[in-house]
Amino acid sequence: MAVRRKAFAAGITVCLAAVLTLTGCGGTDTEADEPVWVEPNPTFPAGSTMERLHTSGKIKIGVKFDQPGVGFKKPGSDRPEGFDIEVAQIIAGKLGIEPEKIQWVEALPKNRERFLQNGTVDLVVATYSITPERRKIVGLAGPYYVTGQQLLVRKGDTSISGPKDLKGKRVCSAAGSTSIKNVEEKYQAQPVPYGTYTECVEQLLDEKVDAVTTDGALLLGYAAEKPNELEVVGEPFSEERYGVGYRKGDQQMCEFLNKTLDRSYRDGTWVDALSKTLWKTSGAVPYPDVDPCP
């Protein structure tokens, strides 16, 4: 997998030469709630999933509801917000589907594969790391973002400065995630799985666990919400590549998703989505090439 420009979430702002003439560095004046441009008259192969979705005028997309900056649904809000939400709207727009016709479904690490297999959702855009194991079960197009696993601790806790300090420590992450498996197998941490990362953060604040681990972009979002209580420590110790989940074997959907993502890199909509969401927390701009469809 080639990466044109890649900077892990470490507070470094990187401008992308390929889109500077369209957006500039540091964002645009576009408001976060401005609808993504919708393709007026798209055409798709007869009988394809894209044709079915376009004809119906609606789509069900699995996303996170509890991750600030990525996929977060505020109490009382009708829709979530964040980078994944923006990416999902870009995809829906290329199908000719308006943002208000998207049904947002909360997708957790433990149910993403099942939701795709049984048709609960049409797509998953939920910090869904691409792995060989997952690709045996579902399709994953992309990646559309590259980050790395890091650690969130209580501010001032000097006992953990990186993964080398995790042996015997209580480390929380989402059940079924690659992150919790990684710290248990590689660093002998004591895994504490919960349904959501927000629950893990609550456990950390209550001093019931010693650290929370997942992708750095997500952890920086939580730290930004409570800067006097939480901090991210250490350098990234894995590479996480977010993909768009679809039903395994749908070759046409894979090609459509990859084309849509690649176009968004070139037309400025991808970097605009970052400038409205993740740039505010991570300050890093990874610009990946998509993997070939299987």
Image (cartoon, rainbow, N blue to C red):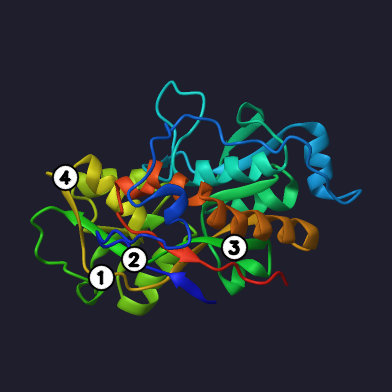
**Which SS class for mark 4?**
loop
The CA span between labels 2 and 1 is: 9 Å
- Tag 4: amino acid: Pro
In the drawing, what numbered circle is on residue 227?
4
The quarter holding residue 63 reads top right
User: Residue 32, percent across and down?
Assistant: 43, 33
Q: Nearer the viewer, residue 104 or 184?
A: 104
Q: Are marks 2 and 1 in contact (CB under 8 Å)?
A: yes
Q: Nearer the viewer, residue 201 or 131?
A: 131
Along the polypeptide, which appears first: circle 2 or circle 4? 2
User: Residue 64, percent across and down?
Assistant: 49, 43
How packed mark 2 is, by other alpha carbons closer than 10 Å (few <14, some 14-19, many 20 or more), is: many
Q: Image height check: is 190 above or below 42?
A: below
Along the polypeptide, which appears first: circle 2 or circle 1? 2
Q: Which residue is mark 2?
A: 8
**Which SS class for mark 3?**
strand
Q: Are marks 4 and 3 in contact (CB under 8 Å)?
A: no
- Tag 1: amino acid: Glu
In the drawing, what numbered circle is on residue 235?
1
Residue at the spot 54% in from the left edge and 53% down from the top edge:
110
How packed mark 1 is, by other alpha carbons closer than 10 Å (few <14, some 14-19, many 20 or more), is: some
Q: Which residue is mark 3?
A: 142
